[in-house]
Amino acid sequence: MSTVRPIPTTGTRFTRAAAWVVGLLLTFAVLPAAVHPTEARADNPIVQHVYTADPSPLVHNGRVYLYTGHDEDGSTSSFVMKDWRVWSSADMVNWTDHGSPLSLNTFSWAADNAWAGQAVERGGKFYWYVPVTVRGTGQFAIGVAVADSPTGPFRDALGHPLVENTEIDPTVFIDDDGQAYLYWGNPNLWYVKLNADMTSYAGSPTRIPLTTAGFGTRTDNPDRPTLYEEGPWVYKRGGLYYIVYAAKCCQEFIAYSTAPSPTGPWTYRGTVMPAQGNSFTNHPGIVDFKGNSYFFYHNGALPGGGGFTRSVAVERFSYNADGTIPVINMTNSGAPQADTLNPYVRQEAETLAWGSGIETEWTSDGGMNVGWIDNGDYIKVKGVAFGPGASSFTARVASASAGGTVELRLGSPSGTVVGRCGVPNTGGWQTWTTVTCPVGGAAGTQDLYLRFTGGSGYLLNMNWWQFTPGTS
Ligand code: FUB
C-alpha cells in the first residue's frame, strides 16, 4: 500500500520532484528534535502512541474534537496512510483516544492515501471530507462521510466521490448565512458552494486566482509563482475571512491571506508558523475554545518522527488587535491547560496528556482500552483536581498474564505514591474486573501518573478509572 505523493502533471514535474528530494533530504538531514517521553518533557505533540498528521479541530458541546490522519509506523520514504483518527479534549491537554471511525475501507471506491481532511457539524450530523485516490484511476478525489456523533461511526454519504479533479486537502466553511463552501487544492486552489445537505454542490468548482497579491510571491519555482501549496483552512472572524495554508515546498511553512468575502479577493498577510519541526509538510487548523484561540499543526518531533511519521501539536495564541495572526512557533510545552480534570467521575484510561510505552485498542467492555503495558510504562493525566482529598481509586482492568500493580504517583513517574492497586490475572485481555485500593495524600490539583509495575511481558489492560472523594 506504500505510495508516494504524485507529482502534478501540469508542467511542474521537475521542480516538484526536486522539491520532494529536498524534503526527503530534510527529513533525514535535520537532527530530530526528538521528544523523549520522560518526566522532564511537556505535552506536545499531543498524541504519543501513534503518529498523527493533518489536524482538523472541531468544537462541539464543550469539547474540542480533533480529526487527524494517521502515518503508519516506520515509513521513511512515502506516506503510508490508511485510516483517520479522532481525539477529543475538554482542556486542550488531556486527550481521549476515540480510535479510527473512518478508513479507506469506508469508501468502496477508494484505493489508497487517506490524506488531509476536515470534519464539520451541521444540523446534528457530522460530515468528514477527505481526499483519497480512486480505485482504477489512481487519481485523487474527495469523498464525504457522515455520522450522527462526532466520534462516528462514519459511513460513506454518497457511495462515490463528491468532487473528482485530482486535487487534495478539502476544508469546509459554513458562513453566517448558512451557505457552506468546500475549498481544496494542490497545485491549484478551488472552491464550490455546497448545498444544505452538505453532500452535493451547486454549479461547477471555481478556480481561485493564485495571484502574488493574494498568496505571496514564490521565487524558487517558476511553475508556482505564489506561496500557496496545499492544506487550506478557511474561517471567519470579526467579519474578515481567513485562509490559512501550507506555503512553499519543501519544507513548508504556514501562511495566511484574508478577504472581505468567502470568495475573495484574497490579500496575502504573511507567516503564521515558520518552517520548523523535522517534517517537510505542515498543515493548519484553527479554533476558538473556552475563550482562547488555538493553532494546530504537525511536525516530526516524536522519536522515530520525520516527514512520513508526523505528530499533531497545538499552541495557544492571541490575535493582534487589528485581527492579524502573530507568528507562532512550535513548542514542546504546547497549550496551557484550559480546565482541570475531575477524578471523581469515570475517566477513560485512554484520556491522557502523555503516554509512555502504552497503546490503545477497541475493547469488548465498551469504547477503547489502554493495553500493551510493560513494567515501567505510565500514563500522565495533567491537572487533576482532587480538592480536599481522595480516599480510594477504582479501575476497570483485565489481564491474561500474572497482572501487575498500578502505582498512583503525583508530579512525575517517580513522584510521591498515593496508592497502589494490584491487578490479578482475570482470565483474558478482554476479561474485565473492577479493582479498588485505598488512597492517601492526593489533594489539590496535581499531575497524576498511573505507573505500571510487575514482571516481564505485558501486565494488564485498563479501560477506565475513578477516584472516590474523602480521606482514607
Ligand atoms: O498527509 C498527506 C498530505 O501531506 C496532506 O494531504 C497534505 O496536506 C500534507 O500534509
Image (cartoon, helix red, strand yellow):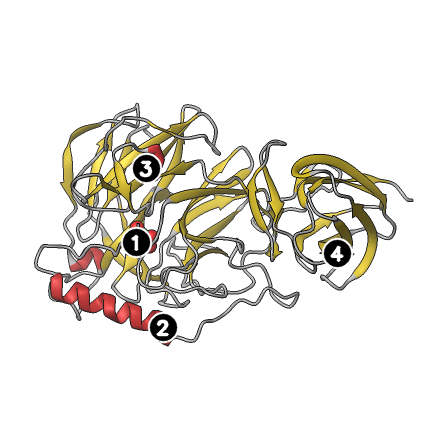
Identify the image quadrant of residue 97: top right
Amino acid identity at mark 4: Gly
In the shown orientation, is residue 69 left or right of residue 95? left
Q: Position of residue 332 (x, y in %)?
A: 53, 65
Query: What element does badge 4 sit on?
Result: loop
Between discs 1 and 2, the one toward the N terminus: 1
Q: Is residue 169 above or below residue 160?
A: below
Residue pictured at 81% horizontal, 47% vertical: 421
Residue pictured at 52% horizontal, 39% vertical: 98
268 vs 250, nearest the viewer: 250
Amino acid identity at mark 1: Ser
Dot 4 corresponds to which residue? 454
Amino acid identity at mark 2: Phe
Dot 2 corresponds to which residue? 28
Between discs 4 and 3, the one toward the N terminus: 3
Q: Residues within 10 Å of mark 4 (few under 14, many from 20)?
A: some
Dot 3 corresponds to which residue? 129
Q: Residues within 10 Å of mark 1 (few under 14, many from 20)?
A: few
Q: Which mark is residue 2?
A: 1
Amino acid identity at mark 3: Tyr
397 vs 232, nearest the viewer: 397
Q: Residues within 10 Å of mark 3 (few under 14, many from 20)?
A: many
Residue pictured at 35% horizontal, 49% vertical: 81
Q: Is residue 255 above or below residue 97?
A: below
